[in-house]
Amino acid sequence: MGELEQAVLDWIAQHSGSQELAGQIAAAEVQKRDFMGTGLFLYLSVPEGSVLIPDGVRPVCPHISSDMLMDGAGSSLFMKNGRLHYLEVYSRGGFMPETLEKWDLGPAQS
């Protein structure tokens, strides 16, 4: 897992208000990382004994600002059957480098 992806997941854990979500993020392991040129998908797994994330929990995902991105980037965390499934990070316009050198995370822009 890259530094950006870890920072995004940590931000989500701190801002989403769910101990179950935060616990799964802390225990998550990367199964696969797909870089697409305009973003990436990070497929995750959590240990079998992990407490399931309740149905009503909606991850609060950050906006990513960087001089290396034309209009910044967004992020979304997806769950399946109460477990983390994958993180998507996507450019809001144009190419996204596979590795960002500097970035800031903040509330998502509407």
Image: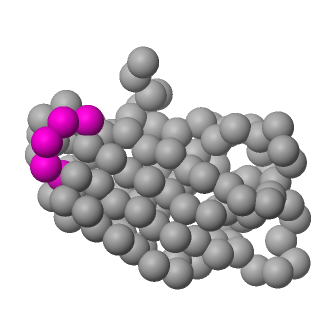
Query: What are the residue bounds of the magenta stretch?
Result: 92-96
Q: Nearer the viewer, residue 10 or 87?
A: 87
Residue drawn at x 60%, y 52% as measured from the top left: 78
Horizontal arrangement in the rendering, residue 88 relative to residue 11 (left or right):
left
Residue 23 in sight from this viewpoint? no
Residue 46 covered by magenta stretch: no
Reply above or below: 34 against 8: below
Reply above or below: 88 against 84: above
Looking at this view, name the residue that lies furthest to the top: 110
* Chief secondary structure of the magenta portion: loop
Q: Nearer the viewer, residue 35 or 10?
A: 35
Q: Quadrant of residue 58?
A: top right
Residue drawn at x 58%, y 78% as measured from the top left: 29
Reply above or below: 102 against 108: below
From the top left corner, tell me how far across and down residue 56 is, in percent: 82, 37
Residue drawn at x 64%, y 75% as measured from the top left: 45
Q: Quadrant location of the C terminus?
A: top left
Q: Quadrant location of the N terminus?
A: bottom left
Residue 92 in sight from this viewpoint? yes
From the top left corner, tell me how far across and down residue 26 is, in percent: 66, 66
Residue drawn at x 46%, y 37% as measured from the top left: 62
Reply above or below: 61 against 101: above
Residue 93 covered by magenta stretch: yes
Coloration of the structure image: one colour
Horizontal arrangement in the rendering, residue 108 relative to residue 59 (left or right):
left
From the top left corner, tell me how far across and down residue 100 is, in percent: 20, 57
From the top left corner, tell me how far across and down residue 14 is, in percent: 63, 44
